[in-house]
Image (cartoon, grey):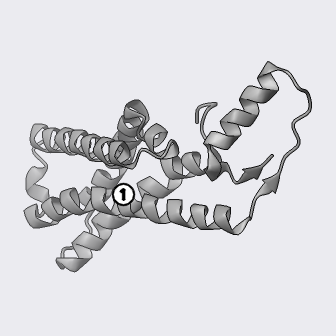
Amino acid sequence: MTANDLPIVAFFKHLFDPFIIWSTLILTTRIYGEDFTSYYLVLVIITFFISTYIYERIVIYRNWRKGRLLAYMRDTILGWLIIVTILVFLGYATKFHDQFSDKVLLTWFVVTPIILIVSHIAVRSIIAHWYNKGNLRPTIVIGANETSLEFIKHIAELPFLLINY
C-alpha cells in the first residue's frame, strides 16, 4: 500500500478485486459443469499475483478515486487485457493450456472486467449515499497556514473519505 492510498482503495487493491477475480473463475467453472482442478487453483494463484502487480503499475485506482469513471473503465479493461495476455502466454509456454476448458476461460476473460467495474460503481454509489446522507466523520484542522489550507482543499476534492472539516 502506498502512502497516498485511501482505505477504500487499499481494500479494493488487496482484497476485493482479487476476490472478484478468483470467485468469477470458480463460478464460471461451476456454471459450465467443469471440475475445479488443481490447475485452476494454480491459475487463481498466478492471476492473483499478476493482477496485483499489473493494476498497481497501471494505477487504475487513481482515476477511480478522482471520479474519472471512463478513464477508470479504460484502465481496468486495459489492465485485464494485459493480464489475459500474460496468462495465455504462460499457458502456451508451459503447455498447460490444454488443461483448461476454452469456454470457461473465454467467459472468465470477458466477464471479469465487467464485474470489477460494476462492483466498483456499486461501492462508489454506496459511499456517495453515505456522503449525501451526512454520515461524515468530523475533523479539526489546527493552524491557518498554507499546508492546512492545502489539506482542507485536498479533503474537499475527495468526498469518498467521508470527512467533514
- For numbered disc 1, what is the local secondary structure? helix
Tell me where residue 54 appears, x and y as whole percent.
35, 36
Query: For this rendering, which residue is in front, 132 or 137?
Result: 132
Across the whole image, how many numbered discs are drawn on residues?
A: 1
Provide the residue designation for mark 1. Answer: 117
Left/right placement of residue 50 relative to residue 137 reads left
> Which residue sits at x=24%, y=57%?
39
Tell me where residue 137 appears, x and y as whole percent.
80, 55
> Which residue sits at x=87%, y=36%?
141
Question: Dot 1, how many residues are within 10 Å of its Cα: few (below 14), some (14-19), or many (20+)?
Answer: some
Residue 156, quarter of the rendered image:
top right
Query: For this rendering, which residue is in front, 128 or 13?
Result: 128
Tell me where residue 143 appears, x and y as whole percent.
91, 27
Amino acid under disc 1? Ile
Residue 99, quarter of the rendered image:
bottom left
Left/right placement of residue 41 relative to residue 137 reads left
